Amino acid sequence: MLKPLIIGIGELFWDILPERHYVGGAPVNIVYHATKQGADGCLVSAIGDDENGYDMRAELYRKGISDRYVATAPALPTGSFVLGQPEYASYSNLNTPAAWDLVSYTTDLEILASHADAICFGMLPQRKEVTASTIMNMLEDAPNECLRIFDMDMNCGFHSKSAIQNSLRLCNILKLNDDELHFLTEILELQDNKAVMGIIAHRYNLKYIILTRGADGSVLFNGESFIAVPALSYEEEVDDTGCGDAFTAAFVTALLYDVRPADAMLHASKVAGYVCSHGGSMPEIPPEHRLVIHNENNIRTKTEC
């Protein structure tokens, strides 16, 4: 049996707080958590030829994340996101342009895409043409059965109707929250009613729509029926940074290990709840919050990340 290969592509930056800085960006969070759940996670991004870039590679190594597909873009600086108080965070504080805006499509990435079991991407890395084009090429070159997960994440500050429509055309799993569903309904000029998820799923031939609702849990729609899962937390919420990314990684990895969708949603909710109750987007994940993989010793790596 081969480990599923899950790719996170897009932004990579330092979250800079007054007291410390740490690695940020949905793709790196997803890759970290997919790896913790038993998948091979591959990060596709770029950093600058600068001190922040050197520190980034060192931090990725400490987190157990391969930088094989993290290119160096000498013309631009490593991404940074300057935060004041986290509750007032705004993506307008991201440096623009940054190295991750220049992720070029290479032969190596074409080969990587051909092995992918899942590719996770969002809106933010599509703000510039080079990286946006690479994302589209990887999605098009991936195997037909590859899961293509589009997280709308409208908090990123980049809202392009054409990018949204292209992403919907190429994805087969859509992840969004209530506000993003309302926004998408307006963008697509649909009536905001209970049937809208079905209309979107059928129009774009989506396998699943995941609707996250914070304290109200989450809903999985398969085009015909809904599965509702409550939000699960273990302690007082400390920091919700990266919780949605942990959810995505846990859900997708579980699906790829043939876990039933309802059970995959429950597992993802448990993992996200654990991450929210601990500081930072990439806490150590204890065994009880990892997938139980049978015949683990017989699982081989598909390709080197």
Image (cartoon, grey):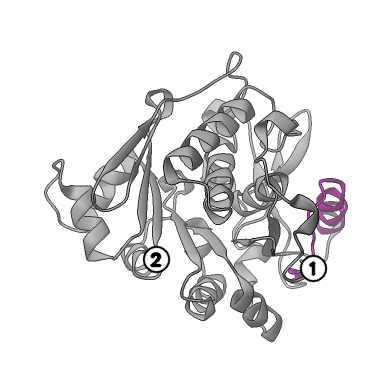
Q: Position of residue 261 (x, y in %)?
A: 44, 45
As drawn, 203 above or below 269: below
Neighbourhood count class around disc 1 (C-alpha, 10 Å): few under 14, some 14–19, many 20 upward: few
**As drawn, is 59 to the left or to the right of 293?**
right
Observer-nearest of 107 and 55: 107
Q: Can residue 85 be seen in this snapshot? A: no
Observer-nearest of 99 and 66: 66
Q: Position of residue 225 (x, y in %)?
A: 25, 45
At a point 35% along the width and 64% down the height, the residue shown is 168
Q: Position of residue 259 (x, y in %)?
A: 52, 47
As drawn, 265 above or below 101: above
The total number of labels drawn is 2
Corner quadrant of residue 76: bottom right
- Element assignment for label 2: helix
Q: Amino acid at mark 2?
A: Ser
Residue 68, label in figure: 1
Report the Cα–Cα distance between label 1 and label 2: 26 Å
Single out the residue that lies furthest toward the front: 295
At a point 62% along the width and 26% down the height, the residue shown is 274
**As drawn, is 215 to the left or to the right of 267?**
left
**As drawn, is 261 to the left or to the right of 37?**
left
At a point 53% along the width and 37% down the height, the residue shown is 268
Residue 57, label in figure: none
Residue 167, label in figure: 2
As drawn, 196 above or below 203: above
The region drawn magenta spans 53-72
Observer-nearest of 149 and 280: 149
